[in-house]
Image (cartoon, rainbow, N blue to C red):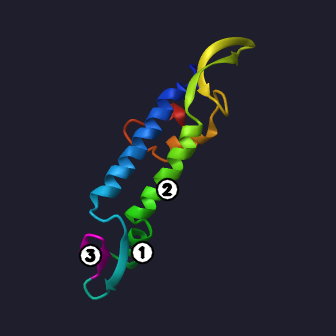
Amino acid sequence: MGSSPIRLDEVWAFCSARLDDDVRIARSVGFEHIEVVDYLWESKHLLLQGDSGSKSTGELDAALAEHVARHDPARVLAEVAWKRDQLAEHEPSLQAAERDGELTPMVVCAIDGDDCAFTMGLAALYDRHPDYQEEWRL
């Protein structure tokens, strides 16, 4: 994982901030749940119905329309809630850990120690974010 140890608390905070971003974006759509009412083939617009009324998108192809419908805000919010629960279980804390054969105080995951595949894997899902650090890559 590189010459200096990865600060797991920084990776964990990065993941938590990205989940905050996902919630903010999902809520900014104006619908808590989107249902595809119709895909208007001639104009290539997707007609969406939600708790805030209906909206028509700009021109979309069928695959993009299906993707938008599948990843509606309600689904995104449910997925974020699950990821938050999992991330909370892997929250790093200061513990006695072994490094180079000696016990030393380190910030590590309570489940996986200093090699937390869950946190690192979650961070990798956001590898295009400008705050992602290449040395975090699995």
Q: Which structural element holds mark 2?
A: helix
Q: Disc 2 marks which amino acid? A: Glu
Q: Which structural element holds mark 1?
A: helix
Q: Position of residue 87 (x, y in %)?
A: 54, 41
Q: Which residue is mark 2?
A: 79
Residue 77 lies left or right of residue 31; in this view the side is right
**Which of the marked residues, 1 or 3, is nearer the chain's N terminus?**
3
- Which mark, residue 66? 1
Q: Is residue 1 above or below residue 42?
A: above
Residue 118 lies left or right of residue 132; in this view the side is right
Q: Which residue is mark 3?
A: 59
Q: Residue at x 49, y 33 (%)?
A: 11
Report, in whole angstroms, how far the alpha carbon at label 2 lies from the one at label 1. 18 Å
Span shown in magenta:
44-56
- Which mark, residue 103? none
Q: Position of residue 114 (x, y in %)?
A: 63, 27
Does the stretch in magenta take in 52? Answer: yes
Report, in whole angstroms, how far the alpha carbon at label 2 lies from the one at label 3. 27 Å
Pick the residue in front: 54 or 135. Answer: 54
- Which class describes the residues within 10 Å of circle 1: few (<14), some (14-19), or many (20+)? some
